[in-house]
Image (cartoon, coloured by chain):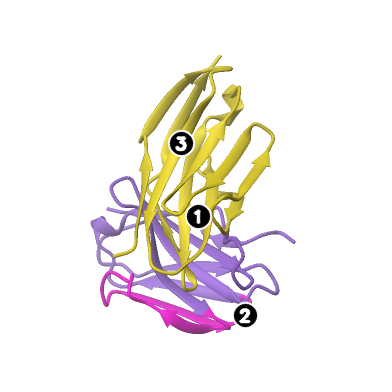
Amino acid sequence: DAGVIQSPRHEVTEMGQEVTLRCKPISGHDYLFWYRQTMMRGLELLIYFNNNVPIDDSGMPEDRFSAKMPNASFSTLKIQPSEPRDSAVYFCASTLGGGPDTFGSGTRLTVV
Amino acid sequence: EDQVTQSPEALRLQEGESSSLNCSYTVSGLRGLFWYRQDPGKGPEFLFTLYSAGEEKEKERLKATLTKKESFLHITAPKPEDSATYLCAVRVTDKLIFGTGTRLQVFP
């Protein structure tokens, strides 16, 4: 298996623009997680899905953030409109049951 | 409130100088404690899972232990390639809560 695949690896956008981050989880995994990592706050869980259904989005910072999982092999995290304080590394991870989360390589987002 | 605290924030070791990293936690309903390694520009890489007090896991120069309130990651005779950030996380219900990590640097 190729692991968790995220795209793009880097994204630079202007304030106010819409940003879409993409994730393909490991085949057969039933949980998908979106995390954000910054120097100040470390690794924070934004939202997670179980069998494509959003379970807990309490970590989503604002209504500007939204996430979808239309099928078992694809998820998106969208920020609209983007702001400079959204600059961070966004990770997607997947797991089967209570096992360890397997992380993707991340998307480094810079909002200028 | 569920909380995970790691110490120290940063650690500099000479090659061969053994040491330990600490992860203390306050959670209700622990469903596993996880250790990850993260290299710059990469996602966290899974190392160990511990489920109950007294449990130990080993991998090469690393050994993880667990008590009811904390976990230790012992590094024996480290090498420069062990330099990385080590993250501790606890699973509460279905999600992981991470500590802020220990940045380890091992010098030759």
Instruction: Give the colour chain A carries in the figure.
Output: purple
Amino acid at the residue labelled 1 = Gly
Instruction: Give the colour chain B carries in the figure.
Output: yellow
Residue occupying the point 38% across, 63% down: B27
Q: Is residue B12 left or right of residue B54?
A: left
Residue position marked by numbered label 3 in the rendering: B21
Q: Is residue A39 left or right of residue A7?
A: left
Residue occupying the point 53% across, 54% down: B53
Q: Secondary structure at mark 2?
A: loop
Image disc number at residue A106: 1
Q: Is residue B43 visible?
A: no
Separation of residues labelled 1 and 2 (CA atoms): 19 Å
Q: Earlier in the sequence, mark 1 or mark 2?
A: 2
Please state the horizontal and vertical placement of residue A97, each as a whole percent of the image.
62, 73
Residue position marked by numbered label 2 in the rendering: A72
User: Do the residues at discs 1 and 2 belong to one chain?
Assistant: yes
